[in-house]
Image (cartoon, grey):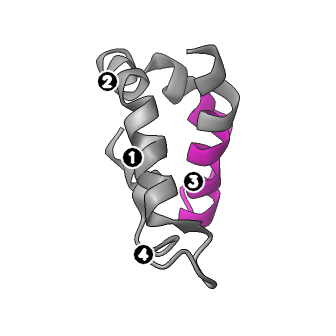
Amino acid sequence: MRALVWSLLSSGLVNESGEYPACVSAQWSHELYDSIRPFLMQLDNDPVELQQCLEQFKSWRLGIRFEAYWAFIAMTYENA
């Protein structure tokens, strides 16, 4: 669960100015976190759905795992 939240707020992707090379602005990242926080808390209490999603990704390599977390949020949050 911590890794999922870290992937959303990672300083490597977040740039305070919102300019390149960061992928997202700090404001966008924090707004996303604020909007999905109830979903994340629910997921923290019952992480089965996240675990099942991550089982599809056999590698623990950082880039692959990072993409898996973002894919999980993209696929599941709208249904939460």
First in residue order: circle 1 vs circle 4: 1
Question: Which of the two discs, 2 and 4, sits closer to the camera?
Answer: 4
Q: Amino acid at mark 4?
A: Glu
First in residue order: circle 1 vs circle 2: 1
Q: Visible in this render: residue 4?
A: no
Q: Which residues are magenta?
A: 53-72
- How far, Cα to Cα, is label 1 from label 4? 18 Å
Q: Position of residue 15 (x, y in %)?
A: 47, 76
- The mark tally for this picture is 4
Q: Position of residue 44 (x, y in %)?
A: 32, 25
Which element type, helix, strand or loop, lies under badge 3?
Answer: helix
Residue 65 shows which numbered tag? 3
Q: Visible in this render: residue 10?
A: yes
Badge 3 local density, few (<14 within 10 Å), some, or many (20+)? some
- How far, Cα to Cα, is label 3 from label 4? 24 Å
| Res. 23 image quadrant | bottom right
First in residue order: circle 3 vs circle 4: 4
Q: Position of residue 28 (x, y in %)?
A: 51, 55
**Which of 23/54 is in front?**
23
Badge 4 local density, few (<14 within 10 Å), some, or many (20+)? few
Q: Amino acid at mark 1?
A: Val
Which residue is disc 1 drawn over? 5
Which residue is disc 4 drawn over? 16
Q: Residue at x 46, y 18 (%)?
A: 48
Q: Is residue 53 left or right of residue 34?
A: right
Residue 41 shows which numbered tag? 2
Q: Amino acid at mark 2?
A: Met
Q: Is residue 79 left or right of residue 26?
A: right
| Res. 24 image quadrant | bottom right
Badge 1 local density, few (<14 within 10 Å), some, or many (20+)? some
Which quarter of the image is occupied by the N terminus? top left
